[in-house]
Image (spheres, rainbow, N blue to C red):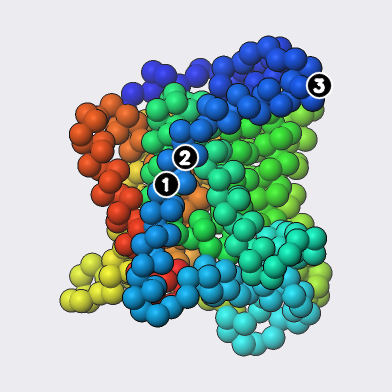
Amino acid sequence: MPSTDSRPTSAPPRKAPGGTVPGVPAARHAPGAAGLLALLRTALRHAAPALTAYAAVRLTGLLALAFWAHRRHHGVWPILAAQWDAHWYLGIADHGYAHHLGTAFDANNLAFFPLYPVLVKAVAAVTPGSRASTGLAIAVVCSFVAAWGVHAVGSHLHGRRAGVLLTVLWAALPVGLVQWMGYTESLFTAFAAWALYAALTGRLLWAASLAALAGLTRPTGVAVAAAVAVAALLSLRRGFSVRALAAVVLAPAGWLAYVGWVGHRLGRWDGYFAVQRLWHNEWDGGAETVRRLREVLAQNSSPELFLVMVTATLLAAVALYALSVGDRQPLPLLVFTGILLLIVLGSGGVYFPRARFLLPGFPLLLPLALYLARASRRLRTLFLTAAVLGSAYCGAYMVLVWPSAP
């Protein structure tokens, strides 16, 4: 198992002199705007290798998609900016939310959380281009913010090399192309990563604020809120803190606000959950997941390649979570990934998007990042090259060959 000797045993002082830079040891900086710029420059220099590697991985995937799309006479922009869930978010930005529950399946846009379409509408109002282009640009920018946060968490826990490797592994996930599509995964992962980093470093109100924003972005924001709440409650062992209690209250506020608003809009307390039932997203304790796993692995002699990839991703996620528990990851990370897994695996909804639903669970990749950090350079290069090329192929296959949403 990966060693945890490098893990900090406690969070840094809440008021360290001059502040701290994400993933960088505390240091003194000049006060005011000059100090803030110095902090930002230092942070960017520290994260530059990770962000450069992230860009290289995703550009490789984009080039593979462009080549394959050209061969099939498809345009790349519509695939990335305006199809599937992106179409739903653009519809919300254009026309708002439904006023009634209705009875049609897979048709009520209240299932989609509001922060991303609100951002698309607001930014598009002051920038040139279509809302679809704006949504794609937001996703790409947020993917770099997310990659920075992923690196910050890995670097804080296990050093810079582990942070860079964690970022590369997250970029090279089989469904990594979604990070550069008009979807919410990049925005949500940015909030989740920085909320977890803030929780790990004792900035509880920042963590709770980011968790609240995550709760306005995706239903799985409840996992971020739970992780931050656990971190805040653990901090009470060092003494009573109003900040910690405020963080516990604030962290789930975004998720509760949207769920409550949907209930009010539909005139029933369970309005949001009624919408989810119309999308076949009821909790069944994993029965549907087990049925589909059995179907792909044992019953279907020639399963769809994309479903095989989804199945492999789910099984790998469970194995990596077991390794994370054995490695004694910080409890907030285990809570976040554990609840994320419970939601994804326990849903009775459609099977094929579940690899994408797990994309924000980057702490699951920590055991693999630590193993690669200690491996020989040859093995590390071979593994990462295979991962990047596999991600490029899977991403293009996912949007050009697979007939449904990613």
Mark sitting earlier along the chain (2/3):
3
In the structure shown, which secondary structural element does the residue marked by tag 2 occupy?
A: helix
Residue of label 2: 52
Residue of label 3: 32
Residue at the location (75% across, 15% down)?
30
Mark 2 is surrounded, within 10 Å at the Cα level, by few (under 14), some (14 to 19) or many (20 or more) other residues, namely few
Is 44 above or below relative to 288? above
Quarter that holds the C terminus: bottom left
In the structure shown, which secondary structural element does the residue marked by tag 1 occupy?
A: helix
Is 327 above or below relative to 224? above
Residue at the location (43% across, 78% down)?
74
Say left or right for 317 vs 192: left
Q: Are marks 2 and 1 in contact (CB under 8 Å)?
A: yes
Residue at the location (39% across, 18% down)?
5
Q: Report which quarter residue 133 is drawn in.
A: bottom right
> Looking at the picture, how far across and down is residue 267, in whole percent?
81, 75
Residue at the location (36% across, 62% down)?
64
Residue closer to the observer: 90 or 203: 90
Give residue 56's mark: 1
Q: Report which quarter residue 159 is drawn in.
A: top left
Q: Are marks 2 and 3 in contact (CB under 8 Å)?
A: no
From mark 2 to mark 3, how far is it between C-alphas? 29 Å
- One can see residue 363 in this view: no
> Looking at the picture, how far across and down is residue 395, in whole percent?
39, 63
Name the amino acid type tagged 1.
Ala
Name the amino acid type tagged 3.
Gly
> Looking at the picture, how far across and down is residue 81, in whole percent?
57, 69
Mark sitting earlier along the chain (3/1):
3
